[in-house]
Amino acid sequence: MVNFFDLVWFDLDGKIMTFNTFRDVIEENDTVILYVSFNTMYPIMVTPTVVNKKGSIVENVFQTSYGALKVKDLIGQKFGTKVQLSNGYAYVLFPTPELWTKTLPHRTQILYATDISFILLQLEAKPGSIVIESGTGSGSLSHSFLRTIAPSGHLHTFDFHQQRVELAAEEFRQHGLGEMVTVKQRDVCRDGFDLDGVADAVFLDLPHPWDAIPHAKKALNSSKGGRICSFSPCLEQVQKAIVKMREEGFVEITTVECLLREFQVRKITLPLYDHQKESQEYDNESEGSSKRRKSEEESASNNLETSFVTGVPLTTMPGHTGFLTFATLHPDLSVK
C-alpha cells in the first residue's frame, strides 16, 4: 500500500491539474478524492506506479476498508464515477478546497469549513485580492484563499518551519496553484513579512499574534486600507491582540466564536386536547368532583394525536476551536 504521504515528494512530469479549473476526465498525475462514505475519504495521486520503501518501482495499489483499488484504472474515468473495489465500491470525486480540508495530510491542526467560510467573508476576499497568511500549516485555509482570489489574485503564505514550507509548496505545485502563491520560511513576529503596502487582507494564526500586528499594518495597502484576522484558541491571546490592534490604529474590532450546532431531523408525535370541552366541564362546579374525574378519564382515552417532522438540536455538539478577531485599517487619506 502506498498512500498520499509517500507521493508528496514525487517529481511529476507532464500535465498538472488545478483545483481552480474543473474538467470531466481524470488524467495521469491528477489528485482525486476517493469517496467511500461521508466520514471516509482519501486523497489519491493518480500515478500508475510508485517507488516503494526499498526503492523498487511497483504498481500503485491503494488499500481501503472495502478492499484494494488499482490506481491506473482511474485514468480516463470521469469524475463522479462509481469505481469497484475488491470488496465493495467507492466514488472518485474532483478535489475542491472543502474536500481537501477533510482529507489532507495533517502537519498541524487545521481550520475547517465553518471557520474558513466566515474568515473569507469577513476579510472580503475576492478575485484579484492580495492576501497574506501566517502560518501556512497544512494548507487547509490556503486552498480556500486561492480559489477565492483566483484567477488574478495572489497569496503570500509564511511558516517558521522549513519542512512544512517545502511540503506546502510541493502540494501547491501539484494542484496547479504554484503561480498564484508564494511560500516562504520566515519568523514574521520577529522579521515581518518583507512586504510593504501591497495586501488587501492579512490572516494570522500565531502563538503571539500581537508581535506580528505592526508588521501586518505595514504590509496592508495604506491607500485602500484593509482587513485583518487573528485566530487564537485562548481568550488571553485575544485580549493582547486587541490591545495591540488599537495601538496600531485598527478599528471596528470584533471577536467571534464559530460553533457548529447540528439539528437532527425527526418525526415528533404530540397529543391534541379538546380544551373547549374540558373547560366547559370544569366550569360546571355543580357536577361534583367524581364527575370531573370521570370526564378526565374519558378525555384522556379520546385524545387525538398529531405527527410532524421537525429539527431537534443534538444533546452534544462539537466543542471550541478558537476565537476569530477581525479589525479594519482605514485608508490613509494623506497617501495619494
Image (cartoon, rainbow, N blue to C red):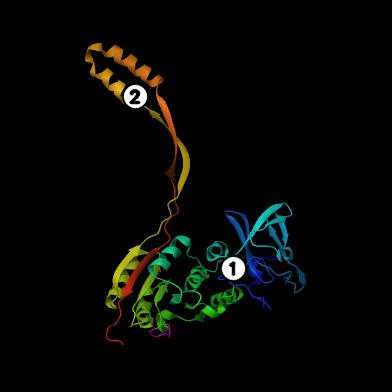
Residue 170 is situated, as x and y percent measured from the top left of the image, at: 59, 76
The answer to whether one can see residue 237 in this image is no
Q: Viewed as shown, does residue 85 lie left or right of 99? A: right
Q: Amino acid at mark 2?
A: Asp
* Element class at badge 2: loop
Q: Earlier in the sequence, mark 1 or mark 2?
A: 1
Residue 60 figure quarter: bottom right
Q: Amino acid at mark 1?
A: Phe
The answer to whether one can see residue 249 in this image is yes
Q: Residues within 10 Å of mark 1 (few under 14, many from 20)?
A: few
Q: Residues within 10 Å of mark 2 (few under 14, many from 20)?
A: few
Which residue is drawn at the image coordinates 56% and 78% (left, top)?
Answer: 178
Residue 107 is situated, as x and y percent measured from the top left of the image, at: 54, 69
Residue farthest toward the front in the current orientation of the protein: 24
Residue 250 is situated, as x and y percent measured from the top left of the image, at: 30, 75
Residue 3 is situated, as x and y percent measured from the top left of the image, at: 66, 65
Residue range corresponding to the magenta coloring: 193-197
Which residue is drawn at the image coordinates 40% and 75% (left, top)?
Answer: 202
Per the image, the residue denoted by label 2 is 274
Q: Is most of the magenta stretch helix, strand or loop?
A: loop
Q: Please state, as top left, top right, bottom left or bottom right, where the N terminus lies in the image.
A: bottom right
Q: Please state, as top left, top right, bottom left or bottom right, where the C terminus lies in the image.
A: bottom left
Q: Are marks 1 and 2 in contact (CB under 8 Å)?
A: no
Per the image, the residue denoted by label 1 is 22
Rounded to the nearest whole Å, what is the CA distance between mark 1 and mark 2? 60 Å
* Element class at badge 1: loop
Residue 44 figure quarter: bottom right
Q: Nearer the viewer, residue 170 or 201?
A: 201
